Image (tube, rainbow, N blue to C red):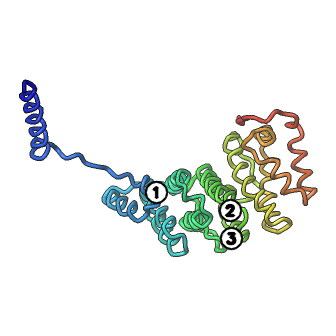
Amino acid sequence: MKHCPELFIHALLGALVVLAASCGAPEVEVTVNPRSLMQKGRFKEARQILMEQEKGNPTPEGQALIALSFVAEQPDAGSRDQAKRVLKSAMNLGSTGEVLLAMCDEADVMPFATDLLVATFLVEAALGSVGLEPGKPAGVTDEMDAETRQRTGTRLTNILATSVEQHKDILPVGRIHALWKSALVLISDNSSELEFKGRPKFAFQTYLAQARLSSIIGLAAQGSMQASEMLEITVRIIESNESIRVSVECDLRSPVNTLRKALAYDRPRLSRLEKALEKAKGCTRGTYDPG
């Protein structure tokens, strides 16, 4: 019986702790991360939280996530238009480029953005927000400085390339080509001007996005006008930017051998590619950051 007092004291202390928790202890506020909800596919719930958070103090990042949530929840023309309206409205909060680049940043870390329908409607919403809907007269995009325009065009092309790599067997070539062509307007008003002086890293990023996308379309729609036009731009970027040629030939990230396969039917263009890369041959494949 000598242990009974100890048991009584422990029980009494436990009761006091419970009483304190129920009467006077502060409640712990649980914060729900809308990004985490979106990554789990809970788009409507995430959007409701974002809209509440953004009331009175909207941000480019928050508005970009709201636009993403519409397209991810139901990738169709209706959600595209909703996302486009959100993006256009958000451009009053900051620069046009800031909003679109924020959207690209968010899309890059969201697993659903690799879905082909989501990616195409998302890119179309972004392009539409600056008046570059495929098949329509180009709108005004001079609110962005040249470098921001180019970065935005390359990031949108990269979103397309990533989704196309996941869905090689079901490619709507005409639609992808139309979106690609509109994004190219952001990269270069004149597609013959594809030299990015003093920006070798950006030039290589642009090459990667263009090569990944054009190589797959080139293999899927060999000999088509769409494939030919896309492959031409990729070859021209390599020809115009000598500083990236070693990276194109030698870097493990570069899909140069897939590009060669896509150009196998087009001997003149393939010859131009090989001539441009002639001095880079014989390297060991690895990491070759340009610049």
Q: Is residue 218 above or below residue 19?
A: below
Picture quarter with the C terminus: top right
Q: Is residue 215 left or right of residue 104?
A: right
Q: Is residue 150 left or right of residue 279?
A: left
Residue at image point 78% right, 53% down: 234
At which x and y percent is residue 148? 58, 51
Residue type at tag 3: Arg
Mark 2 element type: loop
Give the quarter of the image for residue 45.
bottom left
Q: Earlier in the sequence, mark 2 or mark 3?
A: 2
Q: Is residue 291 above or below residue 101?
A: above
Give the quarter of the image for residue 48.
bottom left
At which x and y percent is residue 258? 81, 51
Q: How many marks?
A: 3
Is residue 97 visible in the rendered image? The answer is no
Residue at image point 67% right, 44% down: 202
Q: Which mark is residue 231?
A: none
Residue at image point 23% right, 46% down: 28
Picture quarter with the N terminus: top left
Q: Dot 2: within a 10 Å radius of its alpha carbon, few (fewer than 14), some, or many (20 or more) residues?
A: few
Q: Which mark is residue 167?
A: 2
At which x and y percent is residue 273? 87, 49
Is residue 37 visible in the rendered image? The answer is yes
Identify the residue position indicated by label 1 in the image. 40
Q: Earlier in the sequence, mark 1 or mark 2?
A: 1
State yes or no: discs 2 and 3 in contact (Cβ < 8 Å). Answer: no
At which x and y percent is residue 287? 72, 35
Identify the residue position indicated by label 3 in the image. 175
